[in-house]
Every structure is written in C-alpha cells, then in structure tokens.
Image (cartoon, grey):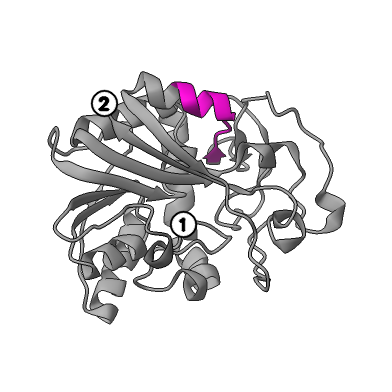
Amino acid sequence: MPASLSGVTHESVVSGRVQLSEVETSRASRTHWDSAAGEYLEEHGDFLGDERFIWCPEGVDEAAAQLLGPVRGKRILEVGCGAAQCSRWLAGQGAEVVGFDISVEQLRLGHELDLRTGTAVRTVAADAVAIPLKDSSFDIACSAFGALPFVADAEAALREIARVLRPGGMLVFSVTHPIRWSLPDDPTPAGLRITQSYFDRTPYVEIDNAGTAVYAEHHRTIGDWIRALTSAGFSIDDLLEPEWPAGHELVWGGWGPERGRLIPGTAIWSAHRD
C-alpha cells in the first residue's frame, strides 16, 4: 500500500489501516499538507515545475497529452491545486482558472510561485466536499493527485464537482492506481509482491504521539470509482493507465521504473457531467 503521496512522513508517527470520519480525514489532510508543503515542493519541485501540468510520476504532461482538449477561453477549476503549478500552466494557455486546496500553506507557497513566475492564479482555501463556488460555473474540472485521494466520501466530493460544472462539463483527474494498494511501499524488485487485499478499503493513516491522525489516504477499487462517478452524475469517457516511459528513472516514494514497467501506478479518469 502507498505511504503518503508526498513522500513525506511526520516524526514519531504510527502508520496503519484505520477507519476515519470525513471530519477526521479533512483535519488530517490539512495538518499534513500544511506541515509538508515546503518539503514536498523542495523534493518534487524540479519535476513538477513552477507552471507545468504534470499528471503523474510517469511524467504525463498535459502540453503533449491534451487530456483536457483545447482550454483557451474555458473556465477551469483545479481541485486540490497545491501550489497551483497546473493552474498556472492553464492560465498561460488562455484559460480562466480557479484553484482550491485544503492547505493554506500550499496556497501560500503558490502565491510565492505567482510572484516568481509572473503568472498569478486565483486560489481559494476549501475542502473538496464543500466547494464554495457557484453552481454550473465551470467548463472543466481537473485534478492531478489533488484532494480526491484524501476525502473519506469520494461520491460527496464528486457531487460537489458536478454541481459547479456546467451540463456536459468535463472532469479529468489522476489518482493512485488501485492495484498499488496491494503491494508494499518498496520501489525495488522486492516490492513486486502482493501483501494486502485489493478489496480492503480501510484507509492508510498516520497517527502522532497524541493519538491524532496527521495523514489519511483512502483506497478505492476500480469498481468503486465507477460507481462513485456515475452516482455523482458523471458519464465515464476514458481510463488512462500510463505505462512507464523508457529512460524515465524517477523514483517517487514507493513507485518507480522497476514496478512501473510491469504494472500501472496511476489511473487517470476522464468523465463528463450528464
């Protein structure tokens, strides 16, 4: 099972599979990303860039992949924008972009990148299960490993995204591929073994010495994602499982070329609002 997507863990924590409520999950996500934002940017900033749209550790770049199609003139919402690298790229392509994230520190670092790059985007501090934006106000919603793995109720978050999309509006998002949860968090060949049930939906949680959850990441099967999307009012258009590209030697936490050349590590869903 994957450890934190950030590759950053808190000191003196116990990790394991623990059930959490939505409130506990939100609090844990805010705690983790507020504390880990700087370290995350320092570790992954060169790969992500300041104004690039990278979908996943496999390096799928929106500039080439065009999963969102033409974006010029479109109103786009980035879900779980972090430091808003993707939003910044979209703005550079002529889109009108709003990004939101649960972490105020991530957004603060994003404002620093705005000043450094000269490309500013509008961002809002918000939880994915309660988006403070108007109904039917966006053409596209997108998320590169943002927010959706970190909510207890994915269907509630997807309903909120559907609410702010116009009829026919597009949603494209990347998450950890569900098969990863069956493997240990080891990017070497030794990690190519099944150690966890694919069907165990108990989230991965890190707990501090006070007994408080400080990180939570939720597992959903492929079928779970299909049901959550359709129940929230989406029709599924595609599921991209990117292959690991030749010559790409990045190791991101427990994932890298040794595994990525054999099984998928990322699932990129494309859907539209009915």
- Left/right of residue 164 with respect to residue 100 in the rendered view: left
**In the picture, residue 261 is in which quadrant?**
bottom right
Residue 85 vs 20, above or below: the answer is below
Q: Is residue 165 magenta-colored?
A: no
* Magenta residue span: 216-227
Structural crowding at the residue carrying mark 1, measured as other residues with C-alpha within 10 Å and reported as few (<14), some (14–19) or many (≥20) = many
* In-front residue for pair 65/136: 65
Residue position for label 1: 55
Residue 220: in magenta span? yes
Q: Does 89 appear above or below 172?
A: below
Q: Residue at x 54, y 39 (%)?
A: 216
Q: Residue at x 23, y 67 (%)?
A: 93
Q: How many marks?
A: 2
Q: Is residue 15 left or right of residue 80?
A: right
Q: Residue at x 31, y 35 (%)?
A: 272
For marks 2 and 1, the one nearer the N-term is 1
Q: Is residue 38 visible?
A: yes
